[in-house]
Amino acid sequence: MEFSSSSLQITPIEDPSIPQEFDFGDCFSIIFNCTKKLIQISESSNPALEVHSSSTTTTATEAILVPSDILCSGTPLTDLSREDTILLHEIFSSLSVSPELFDQILPDIVETARRCDSNTREIVVNLHVTSYNVVQDSDAECAICLEKFDHGNEDSSVEIVRTNCSHVFHDRCLLHWLRRCANCQSPHSCPLCRSIIFPTSEIDDE
């Protein structure tokens, strides 16, 4: 199960002292800062085990020029021509946000641009997206060999390890997987979610 929340901050930048060579002409300059945080929560099928979570954060910045006659027209977004609508989506296509989220935030960007005076031709957009991914921890079987974990196994050499991304494997299976990654000169990543387990040097030194 995955769900997301987002927050948006839009700030017009008024600076009449911008040199002429940086004049944006008939366009608005939009500085788009996007911060994404992914929180992965692993719920164990065994109620005696605790819930594990991990998070990763990425940031990206894009500078985009948008024609003022589209962005600041008095026409509601829903009444824009098909050509203008396609053009807007093409201009913003480089953004690392989903089309659904873009459609949600675009009206706020447009409304801010329409309220700007002639001295304001730059907008800073700060978007923060937090995604939660709740998964049922595979404590029943190893996702590599697909054999069930036998927690009562008398063979003490069969150990179970949990990665920093909260996935569970046989230790021998995970070691074999990591050796394959090393042989292929690939990152040492989790077989399930591809999160980096630990730096390459730590494996090479063993």
Image: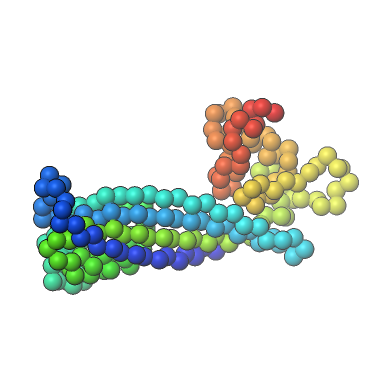
51 or 2, which is in the foreground?
51
Q: Position of residue 124 (x, y in %)?
A: 29, 58
Q: Is residue 28 placed above or below 72 in the rendered structure?
A: above
Coloring basis for residues: rainbow
State which quadrant residue 181 falls in: top right
Q: Quadrant of the N terminus?
A: bottom right
Number of numbered markers: 0
Residue at the extreme right: 154
**Relative side of 90 to 51, left or right:** left
Residue at position x 23%, y 70% in the image: 111
82 or 196, which is in the foreground?
196
**Relative side of 25 to 55, left or right:** left
**Residue 83 visible in rendering:** no
Q: Is residue 52 placed above or below 163 in the rendered structure?
A: below
Q: Position of residue 80 (x, y in %)?
A: 16, 67
Residue at position x 55%, y 35% in the image: 187
**Relative side of 165 to 20, left or right:** right
Residue at the extreme front: 17
**Residue 169 visible in rendering:** yes
Q: Position of residue 76 (x, y in %)?
A: 18, 72
Residue at position x 68%, y 34% in the image: 176
59 or 163, which is in the foreground?
59
State which quadrant residue 48 falls in: bottom right
Q: Position of residue 64 (x, y in %)?
A: 24, 51
**Relative side of 29 to 101, left or right:** left
Residue at position x 70%, y 28% in the image: 206
